Image (cartoon, rainbow, N blue to C red):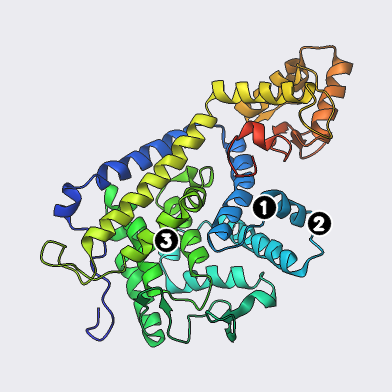
Amino acid sequence: MSMRLPNFTPYIPSDAALAASSLPDKAVLLSTSSAQLTGQIPVITRKTIVRHMAVINSYYSNLIEGNNTLPHEIRAAQAGGFSDDPVKRDLQLESIAHIHVQNWLAAEKPDVDTLYSSEFILAIHHEFYEQVPESLHQIKDLTGKVIGQVTPGSWREHNVTIGHHVAPSYSDVPALMEHFCERYHPAQYSGDRRVIAIMSAHHRLAWIHPFSDGNGRVMRLFTDAALKAIGLESSGVWCLSRGLARLSTRYKSALAQADVVRQGDFDGRGVLSERTLIAFCDFMLDTANDQVTYMSKLLTLEQMHQRIKSYVQARNDGRIIGLGPLKDNAIFVLYNAFISGGLSRSLAIESCGMPERTARRLLAQLKEEGLLSETSSRSDIFWEIPTHAEPWYFPQLTPTQ
């Protein structure tokens, strides 16, 4: 790094510091448990869950930034059901913008060379703000006065202070981001260090604060994409932002604490504190591992069978308002669709365990209610997660449950 540029060393904790910490073990655990989760469910079912979790991820990532638009309000907006309140409507659009970027990243499937480039990080910001209403492009000071406008896909053009942290000069941001991409490229690391580097980079991106607004969302989108790019395929099934939002105060505190400069000779050899960087990475890895554990338990075959059964029982007990009873035979159909990824029509009818005409009526009901789907009248039948089933399939996924 040029001597004139601000220095954000250490990039990751030193080997000696890592050896004395639990970070390597936690990074390995995240990689192995994430791989196990990937193999736990069929590819098609996993894609259904990832599509559903995009709304959940948007909800939690935006919640961290003060947008508490609930998942059912986001889904309503996706279907064209916007609030009459212009402020709430704009927040719904902001949530949809976040989902758009997630879908865009999923379609792009950036490899590490693409992802770790200034151009691509700018593109993430651009994709988000191009979808956000003009009212949310305003930059305001602490008094609420408008002091500027966000330009989608552009580095900030003013100096900022966040809490006690004076971010680097805006004129240094382009060079700092080039250096950031070079130093955190996964090619620089191997084994558990690749995961630790991603968690370290999450803070260092916050420290640089490259955008006039949207830094937190871009950081989390970038981190999710980086985990996928190094092979954690299940990172769309589990939701890091859910864990960060549930521990939002600790998350923001850990970010702020990692901003401090080195505290003496026993705090590493970089400009910034190695001790607080280790604490930040520890928090991030604990949070990620907790979310993988949460989803892994939910998606075990035994657990999912029981929760599908509980959903059907709730329908028949009248505990789900607006929907009538459902034949118990639906349990076997829904469970088989979950574990198979897709059921042929003949197998779906067979799973019903009832006469063909009656079975076809049950399948038609399940499709009408969004519990199953099809791509054509002759396609396989797929497991789905409608809003009315989510609290039973994924209890405590959101606070509203």
Visible residue check, residue 240: yes
Name the residue nearer the viewer: 214 or 384. Answer: 214
Q: Is residue 162 above or below residue 394?
A: below
Q: Amino acid at mark 1?
A: Leu
Q: CA distance from mark 3 to mark 1?
A: 22 Å
Mark sitting on residue 273? none
Query: Residue 152 location in percent, x, y?
Result: 58, 77
Q: Earlier in the sequence, mark 3 or mark 2?
A: 2
Q: Is residue 234 above or below residue 258?
A: above
Q: Earlier in the sequence, mark 2 or mark 1?
A: 1
Name the residue nearer the viewer: 286 or 219. Answer: 286
Visible residue check, residue 191: no
Answer few, some or many: residues within 10 Å of disc 1's Cα (few below 14, many 20 plus, some between 14 and 19): many
Label 3 with label 1: CB-CB less than 8 Å: no
Q: Quadrant of residue 293?
A: top left
Most extreme residue toward the front is 143
Label 2 with label 1: CB-CB less than 8 Å: no
- Which residue carries the number 1 mark? 70
- Which residue carries the number 2 mark? 81
Q: Secondary structure at mark 3?
A: helix
Q: Amino acid at mark 2?
A: Gly
Query: Residue 379 location in percent, x, y?
Result: 76, 34
Answer few, some or many: residues within 10 Å of disc 3's Cα (few below 14, many 20 plus, some between 14 and 19): few
Q: Secondary structure at mark 1?
A: loop
Query: Residue 257 location in percent, x, y?
Result: 32, 63
Q: Amino acid at mark 3?
A: Lys
Q: CA distance from mark 3 to mark 2?
A: 33 Å
